[in-house]
Image (cartoon, grey):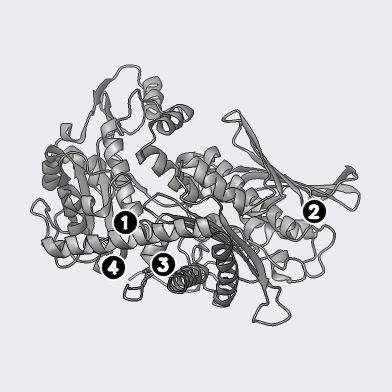
Amino acid sequence: MSQYSQENIKVLKGLEPVRKRPGMYIGSIGKSGLNHLVYEIVDNSVDEYMSGFCSKIVVKINSDNSIEIIDNGRGIPVGPHPTEKKDTLEVVFTTLHAGGKFDNATYKISGGLHGVGASVVNALSEYLEVWVHRNGKIYYQKYSRGIKLTEVEILSDTNKTGTHIKFKPDSEIFENGDIEVEGQIIESRLRELAFLNPGLEIEFIDEKRNKKNVFKFEKGISEFLEHLIKKNKKMPIHENPIFGKGAVKNPRGENFSDIIVEFSMMYTRNDFPHLYSYVNNIRTIEGGEHESAFKTTLTRIMNEYARKNKFLKEKEANFTGEDVREGLIAILSIKLPDPVFEGQTKAKLGSKEVRVAVNEILSEYLIKFLDSHPKDTKMIFERIKEAARARINAKKARDKVKRKSIFENSPLPGKLADCTSTNLDETELFIVEGNSAGGNAKTARDRNFQAILPLRGKIINVEKHDIERLMKNEQVSNIISAIGTGIGENFNIDKLRYGKIIIMTDADVDGAHIRTLLLALFFRFMPELIKEGRIYAAQPPLYKFKSGKFEAYLYSDEELEKLKKEYPKFSLQRYKGLGEMNSNQLWDTTMDPEKRKLVQINIDDLVETEEILEILMGNDPSARREFIEEHALKIKELDI
């Protein structure tokens, strides 16, 4: 029996906990975690704007992978800290839970809540430098991996105020030593912040992509709505967008500032609703109290107005929430002090006091719009009635052919090779491209916890077909039956049959297309599986490299070029598809939990995900071509 005594109790001091468990603070040590470092610093600058002290932010991605964020806010306080016996600037960058966010007088509303942003970025950086323009002086300090390298020093005089931070992520922390942030996603997030904060100027410079952009939007989320409609080539059914903004007294008392509610929305010909919700500029991907209140109020107002104005006849049933939201694009932005979020990721709002505020502002401005825009109102209710008719007809069709069994108590598909375990902590479903690879996977797997579902060809494109057509597709119905949760409004996470769902396709253009089709299915009809981190993509090798006694499976051309220099004499086997590997090779490279490489699919940037999916899977070939050309995909043809 191993000893367990006082020597085994470790005390992590300073910023050691951050370096020991970085995922707890930034979500992951992959690309999303890297991007998060940038957001943490930018959010502090945006908080200065929301407090009325900042009008411009500059974000720069340098060619050496370092990042710079500059603002013209008040500048981080400097000088001796009253309790910590060190300079306040050093306290901010070297102490967890130190910041102005705990003082309601400093930041009445802010995106950062825990006071860990600057210090976490510092802890996970090879180096971090900060210049503070304040009190007519420029103050400077440098750190490395969370530890100060210099004392705070005064460099010169200045007539400006603000903070300039430069940091380089630490390659020792991040996956495979990769410290290159995703410029495109950062740019999208900065544009989003500019939309959410009208009048704030954000300049973005990306040396890696040789790109520069300046974002400034005086009309805020009204322009955001225009951008989404134009970017995704939606077809609005009415001329004027619906907009509202107002402040409601905080029920928590006079010591708390008002709750500000702002929304902008428009109905389109698109089948799917899109509701983008934010709290203090933070995307609430999983919704929460503000989204629930928005949906409930919208459904109630539309039904009451339809009854009052004869859009609904006396004997007709009320519209459902699904009817009222079909084709709707809406942006909901809430600003409130001390929001309560469910979970560490701030993805779901738990503050119940926002429900009354959302109800009040949405009701007031929506009714005003409907009363004052009769032509638009008529078009909107025709759109809602069309959605209701389609829903009723779809239900009749399902009942007629008894398709409901696809959602509930449906038999498992015959092609599924199931596993014996039912423990979600270990079970895995591999959705495999092709019968040949599926056969190899069935032989290779550990049947105790690994199930295999082979696919024959490509599944239907969910962006181009309605749910009725979707359910007729054998491949789709097999996937839904195997997973067990149902889809759409019938989705029930408690019926999930496997803890991991792993997409295993060839490492070529067709394989990428099949993977994208499957991800579109999950994103549109089972998004909870992505939000819970249940969806993965397997990474099969591209090559088997041999040189004398040395052999290795390689997953990228970069790995190959590196080994070519190390071993000038070699033999190489190129895998064009999963079917070319025997079962032992497939197990060793792609299925063995001890050796394989899995990529967890997550929704880091909801707006970006929506845009890319609709470009790649939608009906506009010119937008698809532009996207491929802009991103310089190293393929000549993309069959989408």
Secondary structure state at the residue bearing disc 4 = loop
For marks 4 and 3, the one nearer the N-term is: 3
Indicate the position of residue 598 as horizontal and vertical percent values. Answer: 33, 46
Q: Which mark is residue 492?
A: 4
Is the C terminus in the top left, top right, bottom left or bottom right quadrant?
top left
Residue pointed to by mark 2: 75
Q: Is residue 301 above or below residue 548?
A: below
CA–CA distance between discs 3 and 1? Answer: 30 Å
In-front residue for pair 403/578:
403
Is the N terminus in the top left, top right, bottom left or bottom right quadrant?
bottom left
Secondary structure state at the residue bearing disc 1 = helix
Q: Is residue 514 above or below residue 390?
A: above
Which residue is pictured at 42% across the width and 30% down the height?
Answer: 622
In the image, taking residue 82 as reference, residue 125 lies left or right, namely left
Residue pointed to by mark 3: 311
- The answer to whether any part of residue 137 appears in the image is yes
Determine which quarter of the picture holds residue 400.
Answer: bottom left
Q: Nearer the viewer, mark 3 or mark 1?
A: 3
For marks 3 and 1, the one nearer the N-term is: 3
Secondary structure state at the residue bearing disc 3 = loop
Give the amino acid type for the residue marked by disc 2 in the picture. Answer: Gly
Indicate the position of residue 629 as horizontal and vertical percent values. Answer: 45, 26
